Amino acid sequence: MKHALFEIGKIPAVLYGEGSDRLFLYLHGQGGNKEEALHFASHACDAGYQVLSVDLPKHGGRSDEAAFVPWDVEPELKAILAWSRERWDNISIRAVSIGVWFSLCAYQKEQFSCCLYSSPLLDMHTLIAGMIKMHGVDEDILQQKQEIICADGTVLSWRYLMYAKQHTVHAVSENTHILYPEEDEMIPYETVQRFVHDNSCTLDLVEGAHHWIHLDHELDQMHAWEIRYL
């Protein structure tokens, strides 16, 4: 498949597919990289799209000072979209896990042709508040210290908690489809159900799967889901 490696500003990027006026922007989750878009691109390009994928901070080919936090990621995503809108008329989003939440925070004032979200993080404030409670940390103490590193290495941040509280999100496309792992240990099913109901999304499940969809039979289900909505 045709592909080109380049940078948008200082952000490593890869573009898959032949020329088209339709684009999917692929945003990976924690631990991912721009190259993981390859399999999705093989389907999307067959359907007439190009696929643009980038390395988010501290991932893939990134060696700069930007951190994997929303106040660093959000301006990057806005710059990437501005760059893309100069080149494509029709733009859609394919995002994974925290990449979903980052994109929703950055693009609340935008509209896209289609959004495909898998293992989607949709309510960061509730997630962080739950982690604070689980580790037995008092929010007043966290506010005083601003950051607490727990015994298991978990970093709790007051700034992150406040950012998440101030950034509630809604769908950015009337054509939004969600794939949820049935045994997701990070994202409560009720959170996804609420988002689906409030935003008129479709919801499909990967039976028995956990948050990281990676086993062969799980990937087969995910790829079939992607093809269904392309």
Image (cartoon, helix red, strand yellow):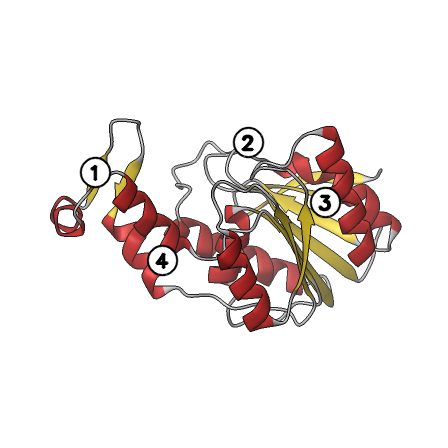
State the residue position of label 1.
148
Report the Cα–Cα distance between label 3 and label 2: 15 Å
Q: Earlier in the sequence, mark 3 or mark 2?
A: 3
Mark 3, residues whose alpha carbon is within 10 Å: few (<14), some, or many (≥20)? many
Decide: marks 1, 2 in contact (CB < 8 A)? no
State the residue position of label 4.
164
State the residue position of label 2.
61
Q: Earlier in the sequence, mark 1 or mark 2?
A: 2
Report the Cα–Cα distance between label 4 and label 3: 31 Å
Q: Amino acid at mark 1?
A: Ile
Q: Earlier in the sequence, mark 4 or mark 2?
A: 2
Q: Which residue is located at x 46 percent, y 31 percent?
A: 63
Decide: marks 3, 2 in contact (CB < 8 A)? no
Q: Secondary structure at mark 2?
A: loop
Q: Nearest to the eye among marks 4 and 2: give it.
A: 4
Say which mark, if any, is on residue 48: none
Q: Which residue is located at x 73 percent, y 36 percent?
A: 219
Q: Amino acid at mark 3?
A: Leu
